Amino acid sequence: MMSLERTYQDYGHPLWRRWLVNRESAIIVLLIAVLAYASIAVPKFATPATLTYLLLDVATILMIALAMTPIMITGDIDLSVGSMVGLSSVVFGVLFQAGWSIPVAIIAALAVGALGGALNGLLVTRIGLPALAVTIGTMALFRGIAVGLLGTTAVTKFPKEWTSLAKAKIPGTPIPMVMILFVVLLIAFALMLHFSSFGRGVYAIGRSKDAAAFYGVNVARTRLILFIISGVIAALGGIYYTLRYGSARGDNATGLELQVIAAVVLGGVSVFGGRGALHGVIAGVLLIGALSSALRLANVTADVINIITGVLLVVSVVASSLIDWVQARRTKRLNRTSSTPQPATVG
């Protein structure tokens, strides 16, 4: 109910305020500040090579974050995406090693992603299990299958034209070609989430599943579709990950799910559902990527980078909850004031 009250209150503000004074804008401003400071203070940060490697490093997270965003807006979560990256990587590698062509192996790996996502979705929507518990289980299941298929070995020696394509740059720019794929996905997800009745249903589910069902949203089907999409996008990320590093291993992308969720939450998506936008999520991914890149160039160790990223995430979650608490108190005060009987005037 608090979310609905906040929504009505937000729409009482002018359009410019709704666009500029929000969590997503705050993250974008913070990203610009980090980029500006790092460009001045960190040697070699403001170079084309740094931009290229920064985008290559965050490409997989960017793609998976697109699919994670609507899932978390519904109030669900998918912790199995990192393991699905590893499983699809292994399936892709094993099939290539068995003599399958690269395009057919890619299609098979994407199908595995769809099946894994469907398994998550069916367990959540048909059996009624919590998404957190289900995806913790499938996170272990997918990783176990991936490691079981290849053991401690790795599949390498992929065709050079494919591995080079994964790292190639758009001619005349330092921007990797994979960003074209990301932009295509971004447009598709933006249309789905922000400009379609399906997307409005996603937000409605996050605010109240019962109310969404009452207004005609097929809650179970929407959540199932989102989990399938998440599995397919994670598999796509696994294929890119494999070609970029030229290696299919069972432990590829271990822990990637936490980086994705951290970036999505940092980008303004509520962990309780009902709120979030793609531009904030993209800014969140780029902020973590830029911060990590700048700290690495400044010779900061990986452990310290993880601590700083974790503190940033905790601060963002606490600040978000604090803002919600302040807004809720202000709404209650306004409601109390408007309901107080006014003294009758004489005369």
Image (spheres, rainbow, N blue to C red):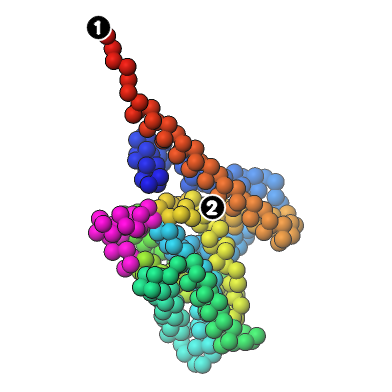
- Check if residue 343 falls in the magenta segment: no
Counting the numbered discs, the total is: 2
- Check if residue 218 falls in the magenta segment: yes
Residue 148 lies, with reference to residue 195, above or below; the image says: below
Work out whether residue 155 or residue 322 is closer to the camera in this orientation and state it.
Answer: 322
Q: Earlier in the sequence, mark 1 or mark 2?
A: 2
Residue 123 lies, with reference to residue 278, above or below; the image says: below
Work out whether residue 47 or residue 116 is closer to the camera in this orientation and state it.
Answer: 116
**Mark 2: secondary structure:** helix
Q: At x 52% / y 55%, what residue is drawn?
A: 265
Q: Within 10 Å of the Cα at label 1, are there few (<14), some (14-19), or many (20+) other Cα atoms?
A: few
Task: Provide the residue designation for mark 1.
Answer: 347
- Contact? badges 1 and 2 (CB < 8 Å): no
Q: Amino acid at mark 2?
A: Leu
Q: Which segment did they paint magenta?
A: 196-222
**Mark 1: secondary structure:** loop
Task: Provide the residue designation for mark 2.
Answer: 266
Work out whether residue 325 or residue 165 is closer to the camera in this orientation and state it.
Answer: 325
Q: Within 10 Å of the Cα at label 2, are there few (<14), some (14-19), or many (20+) other Cα atoms?
A: many
In the rendered structure, the answer to whether residue 258 lies left or right of residue 16 reads: right
Which SS does the magenta portion mostly show? Answer: helix
Residue 142 lies, with reference to residue 287, above or below; the image says: below
Q: At x 35% / y 54%, what residue is drawn?
A: 208
Task: Residue 23 in the image: state x and y as whole percent.
Answer: 49, 45
Task: Residue 326 in the image: state x and y as whole percent.
Answer: 49, 37
Q: Is residue 199 visible?
A: no
Alpha-carbon distance for marks 1 and 2?
A: 58 Å
